[in-house]
Amino acid sequence: MSKFSDGYFFGDWYGYAVSKEKFTKDQASEMAKLELEKPYAKEPYCIRIRNAFVRYRVGWNENNERCAGWWLEFKEESKRSVPVWLFDELPEGAARSPEYEYIEMPKGR
């Protein structure tokens, strides 16, 4: 079992990832609801869920600097890849895709 539990990813893809090895899908969904909650949202919004992987490796960040850390990947690159659920907000006006599952979120308080 890997050391990865959960975390945010930025760059080409923004999202909150939760390990499938350490949490059930229901637990991961509850964590994502808390992390991605928008308490002042004027309208209801939607969180997308998709399958992805993370892997600890050395690479180049968006500033062309070499760095080591957890990297988000959309296919299993090696046996060291950790399966995760990836959560992000459905962009306003975007169509829903069968590639994702969705969580409806209420407008803010």
Image: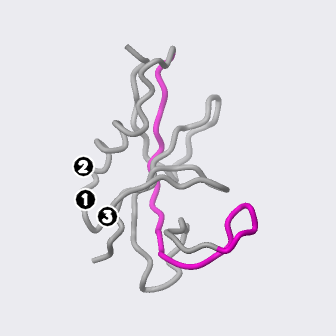
> Is 29 within the magenta?
no
| Residue 1 to residue 105: above or below | below
Please tell me which residue is depicted at 51% across the width and 14% down the height of the picture.
42
Q: CA–CA distance between discs 2 and 1?
A: 6 Å
* Chief secondary structure of the magenta portion: strand
If the image is split into quadrants, where does the N terminus sit? bottom left
Find residue 85 and report its horizontal and vertical position in percent: 40, 57
What is the total number of numbered labels drawn onto the structure image? 3
Mark nearer the N terminus (2 vs 3): 3
Find residue 86 and report its horizontal and vertical position in percent: 45, 54
Residue 7: mark in rendering? none
Left or right: 36, with 94 as reference point: left
Residue 27: mark in rendering? 2
Residue 20: mark in rendering? 3
If the image is split into quadrants, where does the C terminus sit? top left
Find residue 15 and report its horizontal and vertical position in percent: 51, 50
| 51 or 38: nearer the viewer | 38
Residue on which disc 1 sits: 23
| Residue 3 to residue 102: above or below | below
Span colored in magenta:
43-66
Q: Amino acid at mark 3?
A: Lys
Q: Amino acid at mark 2?
A: Gln
